[in-house]
Image (cartoon, grey):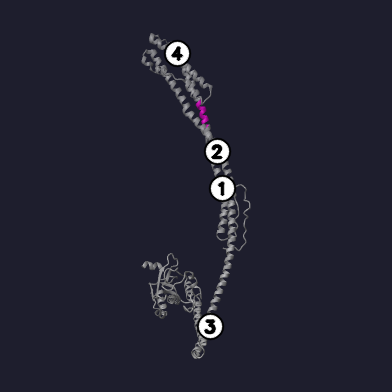
């Protein structure tokens, strides 16, 4: 991630490309589209209503009137035929068609009234009234008198002239019904023409609706692409460039108000993040410089400690040797105070020699590279106890341990670690009980790198909780040198060895007699904690 180039931020107060917000734009667009589609739908509803009305008139009202008129004409023809048969024969049975027709006399006026919602032509009602009048005239003026004559005087009383007069009067009725039927058919023809016209209107409206729907869809897509998709694509492209690490790339504010506001918010976040990253990089650079300075200082100090302790060996050895010779040759020949001074000098030289040797060993940890390999802690503990055999026997200490694992480290340093811990436990034993020292190990739970936690438990004089951290500081002593000998480097050396192996060391809070020291070490390649647990 590079942030060295200057940023080109867009001011949060910079105006958007347009003052109208996306919500207002979409609202206006949807309102216009809704109005257009609403008008078209309203027109379509009106056109289809007229279409359905004309269709209903043609297929129901007018068709019913035509059928009714035709049936009425047929009924009158049957009645006239039956009447002529009765006039010729006097047989009452021939009057059946006439009786059924006259009993429920068809009304052409009713048929015309049923077409009032279809046609307002007055000729329709005029022809219907004429047909009804002709029907009543034929029945009242000819048919009924003729029937009465035949019944009273017989068929022979009917003259050809009367038959011809009845035929002429029925022809008038037939002509009137035919005129009404023709008028109804004219109405049907006119309504059918209107039906065709409204059908064309409906087809036109449907086509307009389809065109309007396509146009509105294209308009909406174009508007969304220009107002939403393209600005969001630009914003996403800028955001991806920034997220890929180029924090100097500006996020431009484009598009309607809401998207422009979002872009300005992202730009503000980018500039804030850029400022924080620059501050972190500056801090990191300072920390790197300080760390490098500390590393140089530590190397110088270690080099100094090593050189000082190494170079002091020879002069101190001479001081100790000649002081001891002075004590051996002239001891008892001077006064008691002189002998005491010589003894102090010899003791101080020996203590200084031990201190320098311990300091030299401390400075060598991690500096003089040894071979890192799998170390069997049982072997390392055995080597440490071999070095401490005299001290353990003199103290009568009992050292026990569980089966210890294999770890990854330097064998000599691990031996030194065990030697210092067990040696401290022996040194700081309680005077009223036999020293008991026990070492154990267990795998560390939830350890990604695989570690073992080891423990050294004794029943000695213990360590106060307030000094639990202090004892690991170099040259820190909790007891006077005339009570317990030592240089104060032992536990500090243990800490350095453990940390060199990537672990950490601590003292458990006091719980009863003695001291419990725990530390962690990395497991060996052939003795991972999960493998050992599986075998158990």
Mark closer to the chain start, 1 or 3: 1
Mark closer to the chain start, 4 or 1: 4
Residue 36 placement (x, y as % from top left)? 57, 39
Depicted 61 relative to depicted 365: above or below: above
Depicted 314 relative to depicted 159: above or below: below
Which residue is the site of mark 1?
224
Q: What element carries label 2?
A: helix
Q: Residue at x 56, y 53 (%)?
A: 233
Which residue is the site of mark 3?
312
Near mark 3 (Cα within 10 A), the count class, few <14, some 14-19 or many ≥20, is some
Q: Which one is in front in this view, the residue at disc 2 or the one at disc 4?
A: 2
Mark closer to the chain start, 2 or 4: 2
Mark closer to the chain start, 3 or 4: 4
Q: What element carries label 3?
A: helix
**Is residue 75 part of the magenta span, yes or no?**
no
Quarter of image, res 412? bottom left
Q: Residue at x 53, y 40 (%)?
A: 210
Near mark 4 (Cα within 10 A), the count class, few <14, some 14-19 or many ≥20, is few
Q: Can residue 110 be seen in this view?
A: yes
Which residue is the site of mark 4?
140
Q: Is residue 323 left or right of residue 381?
A: right
Report the span colored magenta: 187-196
**What's the CA distance linking mark 3 and mark 2?**
105 Å
Mark closer to the chain start, 3 or 2: 2
């Amino acid at each position: 991630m590079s942030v060295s180039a200057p940023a080109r931020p867009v001011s949060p107060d910079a105006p958007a490309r347009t003052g109208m917000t996306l919500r207002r734009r979409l609202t206006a667009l949807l309102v216009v589209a809704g109005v257009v589609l609403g008008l078209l739908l309203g027109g379509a509803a009106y056109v289809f209503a007229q279409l359905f009305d004309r269709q209903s008139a043609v297929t129901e009202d007018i068709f019913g009137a035509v059928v009714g008129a035709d049936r009425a004409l047929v009924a009158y023809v049957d009645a006239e035929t039956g009447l002529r048969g009765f006039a010729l024969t006097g047989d009452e049975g021939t009057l059946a068609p006439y009786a059924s027709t006259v009993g429920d006399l068809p009304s052409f006026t009713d048929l015309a009234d049923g077409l009032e919602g279809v046609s307002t032509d007055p000729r329709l009602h005029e022809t219907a009234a004429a047909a009804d009048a002709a029907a009543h005239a034929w029945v009242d003026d000819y048919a009924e008198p003729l029937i009465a004559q035949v019944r009273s005087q017989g068929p022979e009383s009917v003259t050809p002239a009367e038959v011809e007069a009845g035929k002429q009067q029925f022809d008038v009725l037939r002509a009137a019904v035919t005129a009404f039927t023709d008028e109804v058919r004219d109405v049907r023809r006119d309504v059918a023409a209107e039906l065709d016209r409204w059908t064309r209107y409906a087809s036109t409206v449907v086509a307009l609706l389809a065109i309007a729907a396509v146009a509105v869809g294209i308009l909406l897509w174009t508007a969304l692409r220009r107002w939403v998709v393209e600005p969001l694509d630009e914003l996403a492209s800028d955001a991806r460039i920034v997220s890929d690490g180029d924090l100097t790339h500006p996020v431009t504010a484009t598009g309607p108000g809401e998207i422009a506001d979002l872009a300005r918010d992202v730009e503000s976040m980018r500039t804030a993040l850029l400022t924080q990253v620059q501050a972190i990089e500056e801090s990191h650079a300072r920390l790197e410089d300080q760390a490098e300075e500390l590393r140089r200082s530590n190397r110088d100090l270690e080099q100094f400690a090593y050189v000082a302790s190494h170079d002091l060996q020879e002069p101190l050895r001479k001081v100790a040797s000649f002081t001891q010779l002075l004590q051996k040759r002239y001891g008892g020949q001077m006064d008691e105070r002189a002998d005491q001074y010589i003894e102090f000098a010899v003791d101080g030289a020996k203590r200084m020699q031990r201190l320098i040797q311990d300091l030299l060993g401390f400075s060598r940890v991690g500096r003089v590279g040894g071979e890192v390999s799998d170390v069997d802690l049982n072997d390392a503990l055995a080597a440490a106890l071999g070095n401490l055999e005299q001290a353990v026997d003199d103290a009568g200490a009992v050292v026990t341990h569980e089966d210890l694992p294999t770890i990854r480290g330097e064998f000599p340093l691990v031996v030194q670690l065990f030697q210092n811990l067990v040696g401290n436990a022996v040194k700081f034993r309680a005077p009223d009980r036999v020293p008991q020292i026990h070492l154990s190990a267990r795998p560390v739970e939830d350890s990604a790198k695989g570690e073992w936690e080891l423990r050294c438990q004794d029943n000695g004089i213990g360590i106060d909780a307030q000094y639990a951290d202090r004892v690991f500081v170099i040259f820190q002593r909790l007891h006077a040198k005339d009570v317990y000998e030592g240089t104060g480097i032992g536990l500090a050396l243990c800490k350095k060895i453990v940390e060199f192996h990537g672990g950490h060391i601590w003292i458990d809070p006091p719980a009863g007699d003695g001291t419990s020291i725990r530390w962690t070490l990395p497991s060996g390649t052939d003795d991972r904690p999960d493998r050992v647990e599986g075998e158990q």
